[in-house]
Image (cartoon, helix red, strand yellow):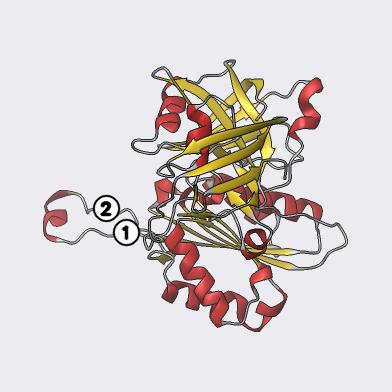
Amino acid sequence: MNFVKLRIHKIQLETADTISVLFDLPNEVKNQFDFTPGQYLTLKDEVNGTEVRRAYSISSAPHDAHIGVTIKRIPGGRLSTFIHSNWKVDDVVEVAPPEGNFVLTTDHDKKRTVCFIAAGSGITPIVSMIKTLLENEPMSKAILLYGSRNEENIIFKDTLDVLAKKYEGQLNIVHTLSAPMKEKEPGLIGIFKKSKTSWKGETGRISKEKLERFFKDHIGADNAKIMYYLCGPGDMISNAEKVLEKHGVDKPRIHREFFSTPTEKDNPVTGSAALVKVHLNGEIIEMNIDGKKPILDELIARKKNPPYSCTSGACSSCMAKTIEGEVKMESCYALDEEDLKKGLILTCQAKPVTSVVEITYDV
């Protein structure tokens, strides 16, 4: 994975725990950073003496002046916490060019409706998609269901408000808050009265019931013509997929990206001892491993510089293809059934289950 040094142009506060970082792109590297809405950048820095990489979705649109990502500070998140505390304007940081298959392509002559369902920081790639769709397809429409904790946690609230006004009739946004802010009346009266909320919109998480109502109120019989983009926590995506499947939406029309894994996780995978041959960077690497760790971990330990980013199975930076043998993966949220049939794997999750395994990163 090749990293490029970019200067930070601007750091913008989106919420108390979320920032957008915009980068300057010198002419000599601009072509490397051409992207399709929905893709991500991999950022790298040294935290307490250890290199840490993470994938962050691009929140800018291709027609924006600067490319940018949006980063939510995660409790215990090494790189997100470090970036929030240490990065500043004019710093030069290491960024890998765009990657990712969770994308929306546009065509000026298209007339369609696209439905976006997002929660929390899952709005990050979605806002890039919405801006691009409405800019490039003047005859198309967008519907967004966006779940946040409360009014102060709505990421891109101002941006979404501006888009809703600019594209009135084209863009329909439905916010739902799981815990709207409440206020007590002043003085003695407030002591004896329940707190009230001024929020007039939808409330509650994006549950199956919420999705059913949304589907009835905003989609209806048009579901056969609509493309769906889902991004956010695993449980939300799982709920949405079940509701869409119930209403006859074909899998090819559902695009998804997990920002955390579902609570119902797959069974832990136990690998076995194996000779693993890896085609990487023009070299064939042979490793005798015990199968207790994923193949990616073994390559990193041997300082072979494999491509990787999230290490949780949610992005595709570490993707490779099986040539011989078999591996099993605990999670593979970035791959669909067609990818698996082609032999594609995520090396951050893959452990050998046959005595010989051969893979290539040339995919």
| Residue 316 visible in the snapshot | no
- In the image, is 240 to the left or to the right of 171? left
Q: CA distance from mark 1 to mark 2?
A: 6 Å
Residue 362 against residue 245 in the figure, above or below? above
Residue to which mark 1 is pinned: 197
SS assignment at label 2 = loop
> Observer-nearest residue: 9 or 31?
31
> Observer-nearest residue: 177 or 252?
252
SS assignment at label 1 = loop
Image point (77%, 64%), residue name: 140
> Observer-nearest residue: 124 or 248?
248
Q: Which mark is residue 183?
A: 2
Image point (28%, 55%), residue name: 182
Specify the quadrant that holds the N terminus: top right
Tell me where residue 227 sits by quadrant. Answer: bottom right
Q: Position of residue 213 (x, y in %)?
A: 48, 77
Q: Position of residue 28 (x, y in %)?
A: 81, 21
Residue 194 against residue 226 in the figure, above or below? above
Q: Position of residue 114 (x, y in %)?
A: 68, 65
| Residue 94 visible in the snapshot | yes
| Amino acid at pointer 1 | Thr
Label 1: few (<14), some or many (≥20) within 10 Å? Answer: few
Residues at marks 1 and 2 touching, judged by CB atoms closer than 8 Å: yes
Residue 146 against residue 93 in the figure, above or below? below
- In the image, is 261 to the left or to the right of 356? left
